[in-house]
Amino acid sequence: MSRLVKNEIPYLLWTIKRDVIDYHSLNCDQMLNHYGKTASFTTKIGLCVNLRSLPWYVQANPDSFFPRCYGLCNQSEKQEFLDDFRRTVASSILKWVVSHQNWGGSKPKNRKEEDCDSETSSKKAPEDAESKLTGLSGQLVDIACKVCQTYLGQLEHEDIDISENAGTELTEDEWKDLTQQYYSLIHGNAFISNPRNHLSQCQALLNKISSVNPQTEIDGLRNIWIIKPAAKSRGRDIVCMNRVEEILELVTTSHPPTKDNKWVVQKYIETPLLIYDTKFDIRQWFLVTDWNPLTIWFYKESYLRFSTQRFSLDNLDSAIHLCNNSIQKRFKNDKERSPLLPCHNMWTSTRFQEYLQKRGRGAMWSSVIYPAMKRAITNTMRVAQDRVEARKNSFELYGADFVLGRDFKPWLIEINSSPTMHPSTPVTAQLCAQVQEDTIKVVVDRKLDRDCDIGNFELLWRQPAVELPAFHGSDLLVEGVSVRRAKKQMPFISSFHFSSLSDSQSQRVTQSPSVTPDQVPGTPGTTVQTDLKLKEEKILSCTFPGSLPRPATRGFKVKPVHMESGGKIELPTCHCQLLDNKALNTGLIQAELTRHRDPHLFSVHPLTPVLPSVKTTEGAPFLPPRPSGKSGEFRPIPFLGLPAASSRAQRKSGSASVHPHTSGNSSQNRFKARDPILDLARWLGYSGSCWDRSRAC
């Protein structure tokens, strides 16, 4: 059948291992039964570390549903575990005193009778009556009380103002001595005489510890811890120990910890709920169909897994304390176990509710067990939400393992990805097929019909959509402006200004675009050689004032102006600066060629009869001759790239006329396009006949 569809595109992929398929390469409409980066809650080390941050997400204490756990892959975690083990030693001594308050001291109870936290049967092997008894002084109880008081003070932050050298802490030798006496008290034949003398003090301290530590009930007397590989499943390499030196020796390695040799140590639940003197756990399924918004579906049916052996704390064999089916299937059922238990070691949750109903505890499932499992799953998923690589159109079915305490309170042990669906027993054959079918109903059928049948699933949690914050990772960015080769610019015009104008002239210039005073008598200007080449000439560079008036109309006639008294009129003085021929080639040519590519397009304008005296840098004055023709229209032209008002007006009207000279040879009297002196004369608005460069100067 697989050959028929091997070339087809699958739209629903269900795999046991997530790494088989690269989900990054899937199309958005292809469904996959896995999410990425779920190790934060599907591995033992991930669940151990991440649940510590639960108070940042939910107002809940992780110690209320998850047995305290430590990672033994670094020194700080080891020290925290060692401190916890020693505190548990002290509290266990207090529990021994309270539990043996009616003992007279003639003979200690046997070890199985001392284990008041388990529901063991009455068939217990008595200890050797001839075994030698060892009495311990009451000082052991006083030291244990001191340790518990220090612990309570730390919880109340009373140790903040106490210096480290205050001497309140026990030394290493004192701790070792206290631990060895504890071993002899719990595991040996030692006893404390007259425990009633310390009863009230021990009971008061235990009540205070129970009010702040919700795990006091599950600690028991034996101080048993379960050591697990950090990233293995199916109960592999899991052991139970009750001596701290053996635990630290097991996890000590000479090479840095890797994925395969990391260990976690978790407090073992010494007071579990037993069914016919046999330990069990609960496998509870839940389904996650989205991580933003977080959507969790809780399965109403679950099943119980029993151990093949009777429960006992004297024997720490995994066959007694681990209920994983992968572990228990290798053992045969104990002959002394109750025949009321099934031979395949599984119950459905419905069968368990019937058992509770017969024992008069039928309400415990709906009021305590079922709601507490829901809260534990919801809180765990909310903590892991930010660490999972969410993918739309994906889903995943998880299996959570719970152990019930003697008070019917469920304790989360671990969460498994890809829980087994193997029909190994009649219970799993029924429930595993059913949960897979109901999963398809939720993830496939419900997309088309929101009111469709979803089997035994119920919506556990759906939070409002949360906008993901912007990712603040490594922001490597080069910002700047590209460097380009600068274009050749015109030479900078350093200075030009009119030295002085009379008030009347200033007013006339403001009112009229041009002024025509009478000709000022004076000596003719110095002649300039006309055969100088362009590259040998010194060019006059000027800067004109920004408020120089421009004609508003296309043309007008010039009004005559009477000469001032004295026969002279002050004309504007042009202070010029000579530039070399290199500046001419770079600036002037570039500016003029863009506007006047054809020299014949230059108009010859009639000049006004007055030309102001222009002084060069050498100080030689040049006076213009009286124009022989009539004053014509004033058409200023651009000078050294400066725009003229008339040229803009012509461009607007679309006209460009060429005006001939009034007299003279046209080939000689046309202004040259690249001569700034002639352009200056034209820009100032003067006209005349037989103009050459000498006269223009």
Image (cartoon, rainbow, N blue to C red):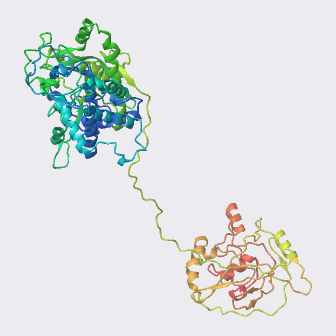
User: Is residue 524 toward the left or the right of residue 267 in the image?
Assistant: right
Q: Residue 193's spot in the image, x, y percent?
A: 22, 26
Q: How many marks?
A: 0
Question: Is residue 508 at least partly visible in the picture?
Answer: yes
Q: Quadrant of residue 574?
A: bottom right
Which quarter of the rendered picture does the C terminus lie within? bottom right
Question: Is residue 47 at least partly visible in the picture?
Answer: no
Residue farthest right in this picture: 565
**Which of the pair 166/516 is nearer the observer?**
166
Which quarter of the rendered picture does the N terminus lie within? top left
User: Is residue 109 toward the left or the right of residue 480 in the image?
Assistant: left
Q: Residue 192's spot in the image, x, y percent?
A: 22, 27
Identify the residue at horizontal 87%, vertical 77% (top origin): 560
Q: Residue 443's spot in the image, x, y percent?
A: 31, 24
**Which of the pair 27/275 is nearer the observer?**
275
**Which of the pair 413/587 is nearer the observer?**
413
User: Is residue 152 toward the left or the right of residue 665 in the image?
Assistant: left
User: Is residue 247 toward the left or the right of residue 467 in the image?
Assistant: left
Q: Residue 268's spot in the image, x, y percent?
A: 23, 29
Q: In which quarter of the image is residue 40?
A: top left
**Which of the pair 78/519 is nearer the observer?**
78
Identify the residue at horizontal 71%, vertical 74% (top origin): 659
Q: In which quarter of the image is residue 557?
A: bottom right
